[in-house]
Amino acid sequence: MIEKIRQLGEKGLDFCESFGYSGMILIRSIIRKPDLKHGFRGLVEQLYNEGILSLIIIMVSALFIGMVLGLQGYNILEKFGTTQALGQLIALSIARELGPVVTALLFAGRAGSALTAEIGLMKATEQLSCMEMMAVDPLHRVIAPRFWAGFISMPVLATIFSAIAIYGGYLVGVKWLGVDSGAFWSNMQATVDFRIDVVNGIIKSFVFGFVATWIAVFQGYNCVPTSEGISRATTRSVVYSSLSVLGLDFILTALMVGGW
Amino acid sequence: MNNFVTIRNLTFKRRNRIIFDDVNFDIPKGKITAIMGPSGSGKTTLLKLIGGQLYPQIGTVEVDHQNVHKLSRNKLYQLRRKMGLLFQRGALFTNISVFDNVAFPIREHTNLNEAMIRDLVLMKLEFVGLRNAHQLMPSQLSGGMERRVALARAIALDPQMIMYDEPFTGQDPISMGVLVKLIKELNDSLETTSIIVSHDVAEASSIADYIYLIANGKVIGQGTPEELNKTKSPHVMQFLKGLPDGPVPFHYPGKTLEDDLQLL
Ligand SMILES: Nc1ncnc2c1ncn2[C@@H]1O[C@H](COP(=O)(O)OP(=O)(O)OP(=O)(O)O)[C@@H](O)[C@H]1O
Ligand SMILES: [Mg+2]
């Protein structure tokens, strides 16, 4: 029993320690004079790796989620004879929740795990250490552009996700099941508030992007430099960022719910 | 004497294993110093201590009259610009080409235009015989080629001191000869301070001005190649002649074989 409590305390201390350490790493890598000459190229490269390469999976998932939502929503609303409200149902659930959350989960699985594995492998093959010896701080040259790229691409990806998911719902609801197109769009426009729904969704996606990328780069930077260590770090990166995204989603929703 | 690196009373432990036990080194400016010793004796560790990547428990490491482990981050990074380190495993950046690898430190630390960088990089690659391999990716190189590219990168900015961690391993006799000559030339023409970690007794003693032999956390012999060849110390003799039996153990310290196989 005492032993259990001791272990729990130890875990807690470990957690606090790595939380503090990861915060320090983040601050050291992003707070500094911007270095336009080298920084910009690295950032563009990473925007491509993390943003553009995640586009396909985000777009395909968005289409299917929107279509499923259209189907489910239509069947439920039909019981109450209010299928005109389909547009509003789809738009609200996507802009408020599904857009940011599902994008963040997909992002953590697609881009986050790749980030962790890449940085971990660079560490294991002494590339980071070699960079240090060449008087180039890997926090600036490797970690910072990857972090910023994730932070910037997540909201953009989430916005694209939402747009495509709503279109998917439109395809099923209007084109297939025959909801009136005018009612679909006008109901949506009447009920979705730009500041309360859209902006809040974008705020969420910024927060999720921040957390997911932070966890991914830290897990890579801090991994045990062996093949086993990298595989564990990659798993941890996906698990931790998914859990954090879901937990934060609850907190953020609770804070925003006052406006609805 | 005019030292580029001065190490005093250095003690370094990894967990509970003592790697260095109160050792002193003097690396004279503009000379070639060889560090030799059995595998696992801490040669790579020593280079990382000099580079400020590892911290000693006791003792000081001074490079160019500055205590490496007391410097602020910025100062340490400035000091590192004066050093080049050839990593034992090469450590090339795998996502960029050979050319970009060699160009990396030049692009980072100078404002040269691309045309000049190109000339500089091709010249460095020419030294190591790989100019025509400049557009290959690191994954397309053999182990020995990789290490020669890493060498070209380490000397790209003509640092004041270059540390070579086993530059000759994995090289055929021809490139080995070329590398030995290259190191010697760099040292003569640019007055570069060189530290060579090597197992190749013959190669190292052919170019080194001074040799340190380390084993079991201690310096077991030091001197010019001629002096070392003349010493009667059994440690030194064993290493230089490559005898399996002697005071320097071949095995990692621990239980004896008989104990482990439970023969007794
Ligand atoms: N990251 C590490 N963690 C714990 N121990 C280590 C680590 N790296 C090296 N060691 C230990 O430190 C000792 C010295 O290692 P080092 O790499 O300096 O040897 P070396 O002299 O360069 O050997 P070699 O000639 O084989 O390259 C070894 O006994 C090794 O077991
Ligand atoms: Mg070594």
Image (cartoon, coloured by chain):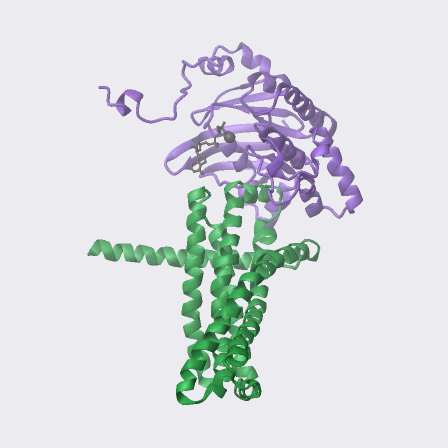
In the image, the chain rendered in green is A
Residue B194 as seen in the image, left or right of residue B11:
right
Q: Is residue A208 visible?
A: no
Residue B200 vs B101, above or below: the answer is: above
Query: Where, quadrant-wise, is the N terminus of chain A in this rendering?
Result: bottom left
Q: Residue A26: x and y, percent? A: 52, 58
Q: Image point 40% across, 32% down: which residue? A: B18
Give A28 or B30, whichever is nearer the viewer: A28
Residue A13 vs A85, above or below: the answer is: above
Q: Residue B35: x and y, percent? A: 55, 25
Give B102 or A1, whichever is nearer the viewer: B102
Q: Residue B53: x and y, percent? A: 53, 41
Outermost left residue: A1
Q: Quadrant of residue B152?
A: top right
Q: Image point 42% across, 60% down: which residue? A: A240
Residue B146 vs B220, above or below: the answer is: below
The colour one sees for chain B in the rendered image is purple
Q: Image point 58% across, 30% down: which residue? A: B143
Give A250 or B63, whichever is nearer the viewer: A250
Residue A47 vs B72, above or below: the answer is: below
Residue A144 as seen in the image, left or right of residue A245:
right
Q: Residue B222: x and y, percent? A: 53, 20
Number of numbered discs overlaid on the protein picture: 0
Residue A3 as seen in the image, left or right of residue A235:
left
Give A228 or B66, whichever is nearer the viewer: A228
Q: Image point 49% across, 87% down: which residue? A: A84
Q: Is residue B246 visible?
A: yes
